[in-house]
Amino acid sequence: MSEFARETELLYAGDKVGGVDHSPETLPIYQTTAFTSSSLDEVLERYELMDKGKAYSYIRSGNPNRSATGNIMTFLEHGEESLVCSSGMGAICGVLFTLLKAGDHIVYSNCCYGETLEVINENLADFGVQSTAVNIDNLEEVKTAIRPNTKIIYTEVVANPLMRVADIDVLAKMAHDIGALLIIDNTFTSPFAICPLDHGADIVINSLTKFLNGHSDACAGSITGTAEMMGKIKSNISRFGTPCDPYTSWLVARSLKTAELRLLRQMENAAKLADALKKDPRIIEVRHPSIKGFSGYETAKKLFKNDNQICAMLSFTINTEDYDKRNTFTRALKVAHYAPTLGGVRTTYQQPIYSSQNHMPDEERRKIGITPAMFRVSVGIENVEDLIADFTNALSAIQ
């Protein structure tokens, strides 16, 4: 259906999967751990077809619902093949533990999701992988960090929670000049804002738990790249026991059909909310790439279509670290509510010191700009004027 627009093609992407010989309006849930065979001949034929993605045997090696979700992600991210895992962290670990070995070196953004940092600093280190954290928006710092044994440069497009913007085009050239890979986490931004593979990235990861599923009812992750690269990673995903289950895969595939409608509204709301909050005297700083003067503004202008189509996340720092005043502020919010996740259709907030960066020592958090006064907001699809009023009224309560 390549002759149609993306929003039309998206409605049909993932409908046709190998090994399914009927055409339901909605793909059924194949809630089974195995597919049976009637003879040894059929067993051998099935295994041959499995290698071509046209049959299924055991749940960890393949399932129609997981294939459907993978096909949709391949379409959205402009890749050759996608793997669907049981979580975003499952996807991240599957990639890093497949592509790195003892003695290898990884350069990574120092303000990635907290558990990503823990995997690199603790788990990979236990296996002899060397690492260097950098301010990913400081290209000279990235260049200086590269070593002869650097195999991967790893970053999010827009960082969680500091909103720093990675110049993917330049980072891809840096990586490829030394024979390394650029791996991008696109969770904050989504393929409706940017497709990192089009900018030279080798692998793109998404936490499908967040915006792409959008309904706060499923936990999954995806990996997209070349068929050759996915072939290397797929066997480890199966061995690690982290492929996504059929029902969750079905939920995500359902949600992906309407993801663009939701995300365009959420991204626009986030830009408008950021613009309103930057004018509030009780806020020291608002971080969103659409804000002129923000450190990632110029890079964002180069990477994204417009200010209203970057991401549905923002963070801000209020003028006090006092716990009682922060608590008063949160109690005064009527629409936005606290949740230790992001990407749902309703606006949520959290404080990184209690969530994504809670395991980091306070001194280390402050070095990268994360303080008790920082709030991270995942913007939903509500009326944006309601959101602006909600935050403005709550800020008034702390004076």
Image (cartoon, helix red, strand yellow):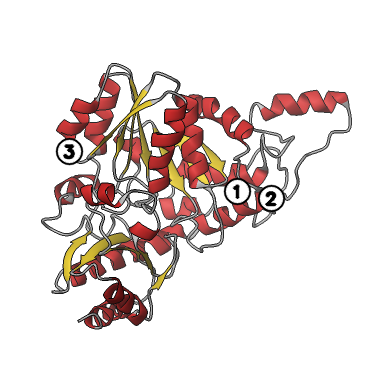
Q: Which residue is mark 3?
A: 138
Left or right of residue 184, residue 15 in this image: right
Q: Secondary structure at mark 1?
A: loop
* Residue 381: quarter of image: bottom left
Which amino acid type is shown beneath numbered disc 1?
Answer: Asp
CA gap between label 2 and label 1 equals: 8 Å
- At x 30%, y 45%, the residue is 157
Check if mark 2's residue and mark 3's residue have beta carbons within 8 Å: no
Q: Nearer the viewer, mark 2 or mark 3?
A: 3
Question: Which is more N-terminal, label 3 or label 2?
Answer: 2
Q: Are marks 2 and 1 in contact (CB under 8 Å)?
A: yes
Q: Residue at x 25, y 42 (%)?
A: 166
Q: Could you tell me residue 158's position as x and y percent?
A: 29, 48
Amino acid type at mark 2: Ser
Instruction: Determine which quarter of the picture holds residue 35.
Output: top right
Mark 3 crowdedness (10 Å alpha carbons): few <14, some 14-19, many ≥20: few
Residue bearing the label numbered 2: 23
Instruction: Check disc 1 and report the residue beneath it.
Output: 15
The residues bearing labels 2 and 3 have C-alpha atoms spaced at a distance of 51 Å
* Mark 3 element type: loop
Q: Residue furthest right?
A: 39
